[in-house]
Image (spheres, rainbow, N blue to C red):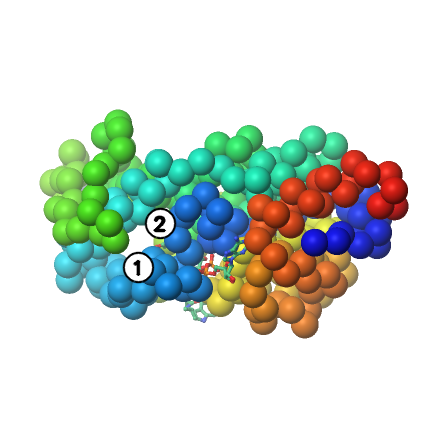
């Protein structure tokens, strides 16, 4: 993938870079995305069957088991070159990472994540009283694709623990949304990496960046609705593309 001299110049001249990421940035770490690959997380179920409070009320063991399977995948995974390149780019200019992902792979690659718009897989809380809880140490052993696992009980009220993620129909955490808006205000260059741009209101963020005059770069092997808005569409896997971006910056001949 050739990185244009124009994009390199934009990156060099950027005052503040924002990375807005989705499941695709973790794909090369072996974490299935939501909808784009066969066998993806939702291949067996509709999103509404799992990522909603109603689904949890209806069948807590099915939903909790699915999240424990996903938590196992994340605990077994390692950050990939995409996470590492994003962390490396923060070395010589302000970079904000705003992610839709509920994994901690950005953090584990050294990035300071400004906002987790859709919560955290590793921060369970009580479904009834909201008391935060902790997972036991170690990696859960869950059958491939998920299994029915009864959620643990809340120490405080005996209610069921739920995953600390934002389900469909739930509001995004106000503090994270605020932080994302702040980052959007500061950024003059936004990379949208590995997202289908289908989930709202997060999907608005790159559109707002473009409207504010920031340069928008999309990194995705597939076309998305953002294609016609982005100033640059780098069609390829994030690990490969961002690693090439880093390498091209170091090759003076690319200027
Ligand atoms: C809310 C956590 C209101 C859970 C997730 C308009 C405005 C506001 C809301 C709505 C609206 N229209 C509709 C809604 C409702 C809904 C919504 O957006 N529905 C969609 C389906 C239409 N939104 C909500 O319900 C939100 N809440 O609006 O609340 C409210 C307000 C006040 C008070 C009460 C209520 C909450 C949405 C959050 C849902 N939670 N995640 C969990 O993880 O289980 S969403 C989940 O899917 C992810 O977090 C992510 O954000 C989202 C989309 O997934 P992506 O990350 O984009 O992944 P996807 O698989 O889709 O795509 C992967 C991409 O990667 C692909 O493009 C692929 O090509 C690419 N890729 C693959 N490999 C690679 C790659 N890219 C790079 N490199 C690779 N190697
Ligand atoms: Zn409780």
Q: Quadrant for residue 60, please give it.
A: bottom left
In front: 248, or 226?
248
Q: CA distance from mark 2 to mark 1?
A: 9 Å
User: In what element is the residue under mark 1?
Assistant: loop
Which of disc 1 and disc 2 is earlier in sequence? 1
- Quarter holding the N terminus is bottom right
The residue that mark 2 highlights is 165
Q: Residue at x 20, y 47 (%)?
A: 143
Determine whether the beta carbon of the residue marked 2 sits less than 8 angstroms from the nearest atom of ligand 1: yes
Report if residue 117 is visible in the image: no
Q: Secondary structure at mark 2?
A: strand
Q: Residue at image x 45%, y 43%? A: 29
Query: In the image, is residue 75 above or below residue 10?
Result: above
Q: Looking at this view, is 79 or 206 the one in front?
A: 79
Instruction: List x then y, in percent, for residue 61.
Output: 15, 52
- Where in the figure is residue 122, as x and y percent of width and height? 34, 38
> What is the x, y in percent for residue 4?
80, 54
Name, please, the residue furthest toward the top: 137
Q: Considering only vertical position in the picture, is 48 above or below 69?
A: below
Asked if the residue under mark 1 is in contact with the one under mark 2, i.e. CB atoms within 8 Å, the reply is yes
Q: Is mark 1 within 8 Å of ligand 1?
A: yes
Classed neighbour count for the residue bearing mark 1: other residues with Cα under 10 Å, few (<14), some (14–19), many (≥20): many
Q: Is residue 58 above or below residue 73?
A: below
Q: Is residue 232 left or right of residue 113?
A: right
Q: Residue at x 34, y 60 (%)?
A: 39
Residue at image point 54% right, 51% down: 21
Q: Which residue is mark 1?
A: 51
Q: Is residue 82 left or right of residue 13?
A: left
State the image quarter where residue 253 is shown. Answer: top right
Mark 2 is surrounded, within 10 Å at the Cα level, by few (under 14), some (14 to 19) or many (20 or more) other residues, namely many
């Amino acid at each position: 993938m050739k990185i244009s001299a124009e994009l390199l110049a934009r990156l060099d001249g950027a005052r503040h870079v924002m990375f807005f990421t989705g499941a695709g940035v973790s794909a090369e770490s072996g974490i299935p995305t939501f909808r784009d690959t066969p066998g993806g997380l939702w291949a067996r179920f509709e999103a509404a069957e799992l990522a909603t409070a109603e689904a949890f009320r209806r069948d807590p063991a099915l939903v909790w088991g699915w999240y424990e399977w996903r938590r196992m995948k994340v605990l077994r995974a390692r950050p990939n070159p995409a996470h590492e390149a994003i962390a490396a780019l923060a070395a010589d200019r302000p970079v904000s990472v705003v992610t839709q992902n509920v994994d901690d792979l950005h953090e584990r690659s050294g990035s300071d994540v400004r906002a987790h718009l859709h919560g955290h897989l590793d921060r369970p809380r009580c479904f009834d009283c909201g008391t935060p809880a902790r997972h036991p140490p170690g990696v859960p052993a869950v059958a491939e694709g998920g299994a029915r696992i009864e959620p643990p009980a809340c120490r405080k009220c005996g209610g069921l623990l739920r995953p600390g993620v934002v389900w469909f129909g739930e509001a995004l955490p106000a503090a994270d949304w605020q932080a994302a808006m702040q980052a959007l205000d500061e950024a003059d260059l936004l990379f949208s990496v590995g997202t289908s741009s289908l989930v709202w209101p997060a999907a608005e963020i790159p559109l707002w960046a473009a409207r504010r005059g920031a340069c928008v770069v999309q990194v995705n092997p597939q076309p998305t609705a953002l294609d016609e808005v982005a100033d640059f569409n780098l069609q390829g896997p994030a690990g490969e593309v961002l690693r090439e971006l880093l390498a091209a910056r170091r090759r003076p001949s690319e200027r």
